[in-house]
Amino acid sequence: MSTALNEPSNQTLIEHYRSLLNSHGDTFEAAQYSSRASQEARYDILVQVADLQGARVMDFGCGTGHLATYLKERGVDCQYTGIDIVEDFFPYARAKHPDHRFGRWEDFEGERFDYIFVSGVFNNRMPDNEAFFTNTVKRLFERCDGALSFNAMSTWVDFQDPGLWYIAPEKVFAFLKTLTPYITLRNDYVVKRMPVPFEFAAYAYRAPLVAGPEETEEPAA
């Protein structure tokens, strides 16, 4: 994705996804996933953030809208909005999901959502990945009333692809703590048959997921 939410400053990246779409059509490969199974394995983790029935959902970096397909196939009826900087994806997405909305960031400026999902957006290396990551997460969380759910590549691996960007999960946790005290960090899953996870997921909540017991004042002795 771009280094700004509303301006595709990284034209090379846009052309990269456009080329994948032209080569592979409406498939997992157009979204740079290695298989449909690994794409949906990531969704399996991200959607565990909350019950999405009836929720206002934003899919940031939606591609051709496969998350909308995934949710529909599992009986989740939500108000889905897909956002991407590659407009070539939208005709495919709209054809599959005419009742949902697809567009660029500025098309939905000012709207709020219950849950926002980001899958794979932070993976590609760009001139300043960390600035893009922190700016994007901050601005998305500002639009979120329930939780932000996203994934990223972990530095806790024995090999790093030079074309991909990796970040330490503990660094992400520390950054999220500047936005909210309510965070879940997931490093307990794999999306392929591998001995260790090469990515992680994070949920940043507006409110505690589990409310503590009400405190009662002890009577004076």
Image (cartoon, rainbow, N blue to C red):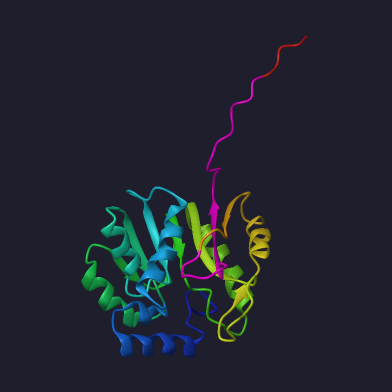
Q: Residue at x 31, y 78 (%)?
A: 27
Tally of numbered discs: 0
- Is 163 in front, or is 82? 163
In the rendered image, the residue lying farthest to the top is 221
Q: Quadrant of residue 67?
A: bottom left
Q: Residue at x 29, y 55 (%)?
A: 74
Residue 19 against residue 158 in the figure, above or below: below
Residue occupying the point 59% across, 86% down: 162
Residue 111 at x, y percent in the picture: 41, 59
In the image, is residue 35 above or below residue 81?
below
Residue 51 x, y percent position in the rendering:
39, 47
Question: Considering depth in this image, is 56 or 65 the residue closer to the camera?
Answer: 65
Q: Nearer the viewer, residue 179 or 96?
A: 96
Q: Which residues are magenta?
A: 190-216
- Single out the residue that lies furthest toward the right: 221
Give the quadrant of the C terminus.
top right
Judge whether residue 107 can be spotted in this image: no
Per the picture, the main secondary structure of the magenta-coloured stretch is loop
Nearest the viewer among 89 and 125 is 125
> Is 44 displayed left or right of 80 in the figure?
right
21 left or right of 150?
Answer: left
- Location of residue 169 (image quadrant): bottom right
* Residue 62 belongs to magenta span: no
Residue 154 at x, y = what percent?
60, 70
When asked about the image quadrant of residue 213, the answer is top right
Magenta-span inclusion, residue 205: yes
- Estimate the x, y position of residue 44 in percent, counting from the top left: 41, 59
- Viewer can see residue 163: yes
